Amino acid sequence: MAREMWKGNEAIAEAAVRAGVEAYFGYPITPQNEVLEYMSHRLPELGRAFVQAESEPAAINMVYGAACTGARVMTSSSSPGISLMQEGLSYIAGTEVPMVLVNVMRGGPGLGNIAPSQGDYNQICKGGGHGDYHPIVLAPASIQEAVDLMPAAFELAHKYLNICCILIDGSIGQMMEPITLPEMQPVVRKEYDWAVSGAKGRKRHVLSSIYLDVPTEEKVNLRILGRWREAQANEIRFKEYYLDDAEYIIIGFGTAGRIALSAVRAARALGIKVGLFRPISINPYPYKQVEELCQQAKSFLVVEMNTGQMLKDVQAAVRNRVPIRFYGRLGGVMPFPDEFVHEIQEMVKNPGKPEDDPADLWYQRMMARGEER
Amino acid sequence: MAREMWKGNEAIAEAAVRAGVEAYFGYPITPQNEVLEYMSHRLPELGRAFVQAESEPAAINMVYGAACTGARVMTSSSSPGISLMQEGLSYIAGTEVPMVLVNVMRGGPGLGNIAPSQGDYNQICKGGGHGDYHPIVLAPASIQEAVDLMPAAFELAHKYLNICCILIDGSIGQMMEPITLPEMQPVVRKEYDWAVSGAKGRKRHVLSSIYLDVPTEEKVNLRILGRWREAQANEIRFKEYYLDDAEYIIIGFGTAGRIALSAVRAARALGIKVGLFRPISINPYPYKQVEELCQQAKSFLVVEMNTGQMLKDVQAAVRNRVPIRFYGRLGGVMPFPDEFVHEIQEMVKNPGKPEDDPADLWYQRMMARGEER
Amino acid sequence: MQTEIFLAGFGGQGVMFAGQVLSYAAMDIGKEVTWIPSYGPEMRGGTANCTVVIADEEIGSPLVQDPPGVIVMNLPSLDKYEPAVKPGGILIVNSSMVDREVKRTDITSVAIPCNEIAEEAGDKRMANIVATGALLALLPVLTLEDIEAALKAHMPGRHKHLLPKNIEALKRGAEYAKKNARKAK
Amino acid sequence: MQTEIFLAGFGGQGVMFAGQVLSYAAMDIGKEVTWIPSYGPEMRGGTANCTVVIADEEIGSPLVQDPPGVIVMNLPSLDKYEPAVKPGGILIVNSSMVDREVKRTDITSVAIPCNEIAEEAGDKRMANIVATGALLALLPVLTLEDIEAALKAHMPGRHKHLLPKNIEALKRGAEYAKKNARKAK
Amino acid sequence: MMVAMIVNPENLVYSRPKGFTDTPSHYCPGCTHGTAHRLVAEVLEEMNVLDKAIGVAPVGCAVFAYNYIDTDFVQAAHGRAPAMATGIKRVWPDKVVFSYQGDGDLASIGMAETVHAAARGENITIIFINNAIYGMTGGQMAPTTLPGMKTTSSPNGRDVETQGYPIRMAEMLATLDGAGYIVRRSLHDPANIRKAKKAIRAAFETQVHNLGFSMVELLSTCNTGWGVTPVQSLTWLEEHMIPAFPLGDYKIAPEVAALKI
Amino acid sequence: MMVAMIVNPENLVYSRPKGFTDTPSHYCPGCTHGTAHRLVAEVLEEMNVLDKAIGVAPVGCAVFAYNYIDTDFVQAAHGRAPAMATGIKRVWPDKVVFSYQGDGDLASIGMAETVHAAARGENITIIFINNAIYGMTGGQMAPTTLPGMKTTSSPNGRDVETQGYPIRMAEMLATLDGAGYIVRRSLHDPANIRKAKKAIRAAFETQVHNLGFSMVELLSTCNTGWGVTPVQSLTWLEEHMIPAFPLGDYKIAPEVAALKI
Amino acid sequence: MPAKGWIEVNDLFCKGCELCITACPPQVMALDMERLTPKGYHPAHIVKDGCTGCAICALVCPEAAITVYREVSKTPAPAAAGGM
Amino acid sequence: MPAKGWIEVNDLFCKGCELCITACPPQVMALDMERLTPKGYHPAHIVKDGCTGCAICALVCPEAAITVYREVSKTPAPAAAGGM
Ligand SMILES: Cc1ncc(C[n+]2csc(CCOP(=O)(O)OP(=O)(O)O)c2C)c(N)n1
Ligand SMILES: Cc1ncc(C[n+]2csc(CCOP(=O)(O)OP(=O)(O)O)c2C)c(N)n1
Ligand code: SF4
Ligand code: SF4
Ligand code: SF4
Ligand code: SF4
């Protein structure tokens, strides 16, 4: 199929349309506005539902309602907006209905800025909302990867009756790349045995997240956990680069991951046997795969555009087997490959000890650098 | 000083008053209503500010405004309400102003129920809001401990220009215990060099969390991280029971921790050398202390009223040195000491291997039990 | 040394208050104590239970699976909590609201017409106090004097005039229990 | 094989469009390509820059520290980005908007009056295309024909009539650059 | 034996509506939430749309509305029922979608969702129970609490200086072009209950005819929160609430009036 | 040389107000946000309260209002400025607390905070910039966007059937007892700019005299969002916005009128 | 005079709130202090002749606990069942 | 006829939006196409005699870029500086 140049946000929106999204509800926020704007003309023209909500809480609760009908439904937002959706997300998780969330991270905390960041990894993966639940989170590193994941996102949401989040940052949302879009799928409206549609010729369906009887709520929690454990077992996604003979391994997701690819190539050109492991499903996280890499890695370099949020997951997998080095840029700063190359060289010079605290050492380096300036 | 019987929520409110809280903004939600109701008569009678806000987002943003004046200010809420406050909390963290949050957890996700739970540990400790920030979180296990921590909470919030959260659950909020309240402190309104008060005879103060210039935002992120690292170094709190000769160690916080105390005594009565480590500051978390316990512990039992959220922190500290067993009850179920005693006995019979996945084994046991029923 | 008491009934039967009186009394004699309620989902007329733990040292769990002292003020509560009483423990049943016998024989039980005794003592709303007296007669964790003192010290002023009646109710409950207890086999 | 091009100017100078033309051309000849913008905080009249990366394999970072090909359309951009050009790289300067010389001698630079040349070619809004032609004359990552084809294929219908003029501007830019390039020492 | 004669199907005048389940309610004795539920059930039954209706339960005492009204149901986050109803209605434009909300839910935390659903002319129906208090959480002040009224969060009576004034939702929403049918009724006596039912019918007809947003504000009692007996609560409503919240039609779009309901 | 004579302090008629900083604005050329800022600065200066004023900046193009108006300032979360102002005012009842908000900020996401601040009679002043569009995020539809108006999220013009109708905030808030002063003015020509300034003065006087919530809705231009030139934007405002948002006084409490401002 | 109407109060639903009793025009209802419902309330019932089957009690009953019968009347009373 | 008034436009602030130019009653203003401000705009200035110092331009200027002078007049004009 022919390749076309697409802007990330618009490509994601069109991919959702082709994946059969029936309803979109959202609220403007940079850097994801193009998703909403694209939907505002595309969906009506297809006779599907588009509403610009009055706020993110309204948007996520419109999604909640639509999700209860069993339709393929989505919203998109960015950091502050995602924070405002946390109650709704928790209700959706607690009601066990499917939805897709496109989360375009920006610099924070607070109003911050609109530059690319990965500062919301913990929020989306570790529990932004209240209660025990785990959204499925996929972090593409390119526009092609993002559009390829879009149909999967809707299928995962329905398969696990869960939130499926496509996590990117402003740079992927704003950049253009040549891509091939997925085929246009017909909209299929199934009659789910849980969805509300008016109780015609069947017993009525009631969807709720309130369970005043605690033993029942415990069962529900276990049921949600059970589905999550299935997702953990079946839905691990990642991509490997130059790992066959790699003695040093960079781990980074999304934008940091693709920048690392450039760094790996540059370092290889310098004769360093380094490879890249790029998690795509960051929740569930590929712990096993990282653990296995411990056998070949002299040490790891974890790169993120935050203070080391995914680092904790890598540490959980590595468990002091191999030294880990960390490098992060903050507040919307997009690192250059050269910075990573430098880190790789430093790592090779001194791989450190498994007990080292990588975040601590990184902080020291950042401060030292700050003083130089 | 004389002991008086107090209901947890009211004791906490009165302790805040005595700690010099100048303004309270909140919205009703069970099981924390008594905090708001108590403040609704107590603060006006003292000529201090009380507002029942129209919602939790409104409440937290009123707090945000008041915090910008440098006043001692607080709010209280429970799970769904805390989710709705996430954007505001992120703004407060990003603006680096102090506040106290009383977080009374209930069963979730979604509307859930009003029974005691610890399901929001991740939300409050690991990042409910967007961006890189870390609230200080203290988890008392009794009403006395809660009121003793209240003045400290305000001091920590001001010292670290951060959110300080008192994390409890409905049981501590609803129960009564004899306590001694802290001394009544006078309200002191300092002239901070950052607070807004009208620029009379000084250059004006502007408080904001927007930093469009990314290098500046990166510096701010590092400054926030720097203060957090100080808190990590200085503000670790915990309580130890029967640890001197303990070969087995239970770790639990808050209500689960105090229930564990009963279990430890019962197990000791059965001749088992078991002790209890109860973290009070759960963010920052006493990683070092837990790590040190690895030297004496044959194995750990982590008990929580969730699916194993703090367990991850224990694992991060233990790093496969010692086997860990996990036991959790969910959805508002408050475990009985006997259940823990049983777990202790099982642990002693079979301490397991350090590589075991405690959450996984626990889940298997829960399901098996479910089938029995 | 730790003792747990569980009280159960309908809302409005004064179960919560009885539990609080026990707590105050325990506090006043320098004990550690916890009082924890548990309500049913109903806003009105539902069940109302509470657990009181009295001990000499820092109290762990405010709830226990098998309390040694249990008061049930109505039939549903008896059905639900009779099995929970610790073997060898005490079960006080308000026979005014319950038309069946206690089944268990491994516990000491008293079927006591609290409503009637309360009415005799001057106010049928004191059924809860009667039951409390009955319990303490058999579970000497607190003395009747401790309760008297607690009532004196903590009864809201507007109810002070009810004090003598309450003390009367307490005593009658205790006497009745001493006479009519069905000892554990 | 990978080549990076950086274009900088005021909003309205067509910098973004020029970058996109390069991208389309690269895509059409089967290359991997990324185009990424960066705007200043201003809503209007602020700075507008973009980076284009053209490669034969999956592209990593869409940004680079020292691009081998740079076009600056105004003075602030020259001041800011002259130091960034990769040693031995190409710097195209729109001399119509810049009154100073290029300082660096380790790079090949062309000071080209894009506005005037564009006007001669028929429309002063084509200064961006002139600069593009100039760059490609010295950085043969794409041929002028590739650009022509891309313009043909992707120019919105309502602008099609401008096609000949654009091609003219492209060529003139290239010619000027060949003649006036100041080679790296 | 007289009785025996009377009690036979052909003499049946009234019985529990079909639209009602057999679940006994969890409401306090005498709470008119039950009355409002019954009217909704009767209207849906009479309009013959029980099997195409989808209800949205609030967070409030009516959180369990789905246990009683016998249609498909969802349960919304506090205050977000209009948004949730919007989501459902946009997917199922031909279904009858309604929310049932208390004053804290609709007028406090849900203010934005309510106003914007009305402004959008969202084709949904809202049954708004105004009982001047937060029932479920134990009687705190609501945005509709009357000046001077004592609640658990206005223990000395609502002080308008620091706690503000009650909000009249019907009047406010009537200013919006998207609103098709906005009225206020009361549930305190037979005559008004009949009027309330008529209004609920009109509201649902408005939706069925795609004439935009419809809301019936119902003055309702909360004897528990008000600290009075059920019977007293009816008089209290009549004497205190109606003067503050005048009954009447606040917006009836011409097209709706034309329906002649 | 003539000029030289004229240009001397004693002939000074007007110069940049003291309440304004020397920072050049980030606004698009011709955006009347600047005009509104200037009027606020002039009024605060004339009332001599620059050193007791605390401003609350919104999320919107005016997010940097604090760079220009020379008082203490905070910057609120999107739509929450009235809540943040409430928090400040309750701690500093004697300071002059005001928020400056756009229509997306105040009337969309901030609807609840706005209505409730008014209902509480919160003693704060809100300067409400109604430019019928979301400027900062690139021209999406606002709750005040006119029917049929093209925006980046209503590309075929606002379709009232699916996207609803514009909200008239002044009219809506005027229904609330807590509101002391609610008016709508415009910034499109000299005469109206003068009227706007008078209204801003009256609003702040309302606050200073503790007469409750005050809001001045200002019809303002967004030539960038509207896709016209600055000069055209003034005519567009006059011809299209004023008919949809009639200028006038919507609520002036008797006590405020008595101030005779 | 013979009863023209009759009501049945369902113990499952009745909560003894007395709204029907005060609303009943001929005032023929009262709570049955002899009986307790499963939920523990004294239910309402008819205590004297004169029920007209007007169904006002059913109209005001928040629990829909009342079934109403009326002699001869074939068409449902306007009150409750009555549509519009 | 001699100038009664005069204005100065501050290049730091002026963005060439032309609002002052269209508002100027005697129509004596225009953009200065010869000059660019630091931000890259052509600033406004007076191009012919007749400025009355009415300060209307200053009143409409969104950037507060204009300073206005008027001969003899000692009291500030009602327009801009004018209070209430
Ligand atoms: C986000 C959130 N905030 C607060 C609550 C607690 N809460 C439950 S119901 C309720 C208000 C109920 O009052 P109202 O809406 O008037 O309904 P009523 O109970 O009076 O019928 C509140 C504040 C909640 N569940 N969720
Ligand atoms: C929670 C949240 N949602 C959305 C945004 C994105 N956002 C920034 S400004 C704005 C609206 C601006 O429009 P308006 O309030 O009308 O002000 P204007 O820019 O037109 O002056 C939005 C939606 C945000 N920053 N935060
Ligand atoms: S609390 Fe009030 S509203 Fe709730 S059920 Fe009881 S009476 Fe009804
Ligand atoms: S975008 Fe519109 S509102 Fe924002 S500064 Fe530009 S003209 Fe003004
Ligand atoms: S109104 Fe209904 S619930 Fe109340 S007493 Fe009569 S029958 Fe019973
Ligand atoms: S109005 Fe102000 S900014 Fe606009 S041109 Fe005139 S002086 Fe310049």
Image: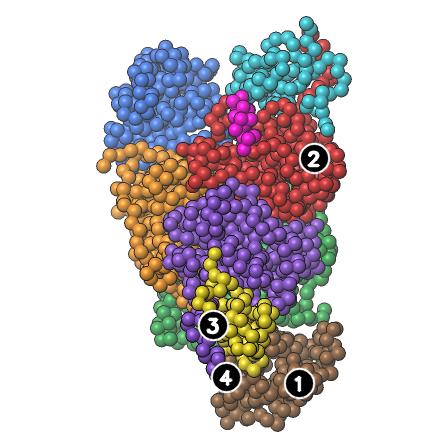
Chain colours: A green, B orange, C blue, D brown, E red, F purple, G cyan, H yellow
- F198, above or below F213, in the image: below
Q: Position of residue F51 (x, y in %)?
A: 37, 58
* Chain letter of the residue beneath label 4 in the structure image: D
Q: Is residue A225 left or right of residue C70?
A: right
Labels 2, 4: one chain: no
Q: CA distance from mark 2 to mark 4?
A: 73 Å
- A267, above or below A279, in the image: below
- H11, above or below B7, in the image: below
* Chain letter of the residue beneath label 1 in the structure image: D
Specify the label residue E202 is tagged with. 2
Q: What amino acid is labelled 3 in the image?
A: Glu
Labels 2, 1: one chain: no
- Which residue is at 52% across, 68% downward? H55
Q: Quadrant of residue D124?
A: bottom right
Q: CA distance from mark 3 to mark 1?
A: 47 Å
Q: Is label 2 in contact with label 3 (beta carbons under 8 Å)?
A: no
